[in-house]
Image: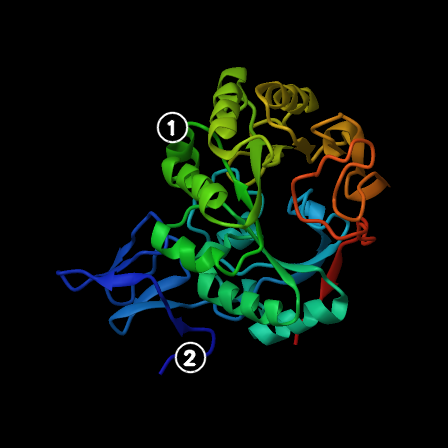
């Protein structure tokens, strides 16, 4: 009998030596009875793998969808955001480390069933629910059940993730996701190995798969860290791969690093670095490139890839001028903007509102 908050997990198999192997992410943790995986929340128990954070959240908050960041997914609408604890990456620069590295139960203070989460989003008028703060891949069973409950109420679902998931598990996981923002941490294996304790290729594989095998709307974010992944050469390689594998219409976000966790001695990203990376990406052929975590209205607004006119004006998370028709087309030239749009923009604005889910 499993205690509350613990459920039988999916995506594992038994090895010849009696251990169980978790098949959820490319770490393939091999566990003896009682051992926990790298993510901490998946544990070998009773001859299988259990998820120990089901229904346990680190807090609920209503955000603007642009904060995920998603700029082409129902702009201006509100999203109910929450996470659990743990993570399957070990990023030394993690900006949510108090959650992703949590080991204590008190970090998971809020209990909520999937139905309660979805109902809270409906009552608050949220267009979508986002699984975020830590990576939803590691609490996939809970995220999927929440997504099912959300879809029953006409609410969309968003995964904010590092994309570190196996081919077997991602089919099941993304079948219930309407959108995703995928963190592409860098474009070198050395960076992933040294600073994330992970590998680059599985993330690239997930991105290619999302583009070519699914209908999930997704955008990509790269946090530029001075001296680590911000060189013009690396940005050029990233952009060339991006255009060749994902095409020109997937939005790319370059965001600013702020000293945190185990990289407190690294300086913040200069705004000039973000502007230079954005120009590189635009020149490489990516149509929609954004800057984040800095004041840059030009770099945060959306422009028509056909005629170059301003389509969606943004000042941080506040929308201004809106030049899309009811079908998501440019009102100047009629070209369709890639993404998912309602006939009119949302009016949530930059507010952030805590929510109690019961």
Q: Report the residue at 71% width, 60% height from top.
A: 127
Element marked by disc 1: helix
Q: Report the residue at 54% width, 23% height from top.
A: 230
Q: Which mark is residue 190?
A: 1
Report x, y in % for residue 358: 65, 76
Report x, y in % for residue 300: 73, 33
Element marked by disc 2: loop
Which residue has dot 2 on it?
3
Q: Report the residue at 46% width, 32% height from top.
A: 245
Residue mark closest to the camera, 1 vs 2: 1
The answer, for residue 244, to whether it is visible in the render is: yes
Report x, y in % for residue 107: 55, 62
The furthest residue to the bottom: 1
Vertically, is 283 above or below 52?
Answer: above
Q: In this view, does 196 lie to the left or right of 125?
A: left
Task: Give whichever of 353, 159 is nearer the camera.
Answer: 159
Mark 2 is surrounded, within 10 Å at the Cα level, by few (under 14), some (14 to 19) or many (20 or more) other residues, namely few
Task: Give whichever of 95, 115 is nearer the camera.
Answer: 115
Vertically, is 246 above or below 168?
Answer: above
């Amino acid at each position: 009998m499993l205690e509350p908050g613990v459920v039988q997990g999916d995506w594992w198999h038994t090895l010849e030596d009696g251990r169980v192997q978790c098949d959820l992410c490319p770490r393939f943790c091999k566990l003896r009875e009682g051992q926990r995986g790298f993510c901490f929340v998946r544990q070998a128990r009773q001859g299988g793998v259990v998820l120990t954070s089901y229904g346990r959240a680190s807090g609920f908050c209503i955000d603007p969808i642009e904060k995920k960041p998603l700029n082409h997914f129902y702009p201006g609408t509100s999203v109910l955001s929450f996470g659990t604890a743990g993570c399957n990456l070990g990023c030394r620069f993690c900006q949510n480390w108090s959650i992703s590295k949590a080991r204590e139960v008190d970090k998971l203070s809020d209990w909520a069933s999937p139905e309660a989460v979805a109902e809270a989003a409906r009552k608050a008028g949220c267009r979508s629910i986002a699984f975020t703060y830590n990576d939803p891949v590691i609490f996939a069973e809970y995220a999927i059940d929440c997504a099912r409950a959300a879809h029953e109420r006409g609410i969309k679902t968003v995964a904010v993730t590092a994309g570190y998931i196996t081919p077997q598990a991602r089919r099941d996981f993304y079948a219930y996701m309407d959108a995703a923002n995928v963190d592409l941490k860098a474009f070198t294996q050395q960076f992933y190995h040294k600073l994330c304790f992970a590998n680059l290729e599985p993330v690239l594989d997930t991105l290619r798969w999302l583009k070519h095998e699914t209908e999930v709307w997704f955008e990509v974010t790269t946090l530029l860290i001075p001296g680590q992944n911000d060189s013009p050469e690396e940005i050029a390689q990233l952009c060339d791969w991006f255009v060749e594998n994902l095409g020109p219409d997937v939005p790319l976000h370059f965001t600013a690093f702020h000293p945190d966790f185990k990289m407190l001695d690294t300086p913040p990203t200069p705004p000039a670095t973000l502007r230079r990376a954005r120009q590189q990406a635009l020149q490489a052929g990516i149509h929609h490139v954004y800057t984040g975590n800095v004041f840059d209205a030009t770099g945060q607004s959306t422009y028509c890839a056909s005629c170059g006119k301003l389509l969606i004006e943004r000042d941080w998370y506040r929308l201004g001028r809106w030049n899309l028709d009811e079908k998501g087309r440019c009102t100047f030239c009629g070209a369709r903007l890639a993404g998912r749009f309602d006939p009119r923009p949302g009016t949530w604005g930059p507010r952030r509102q805590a929510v109690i889910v019961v």
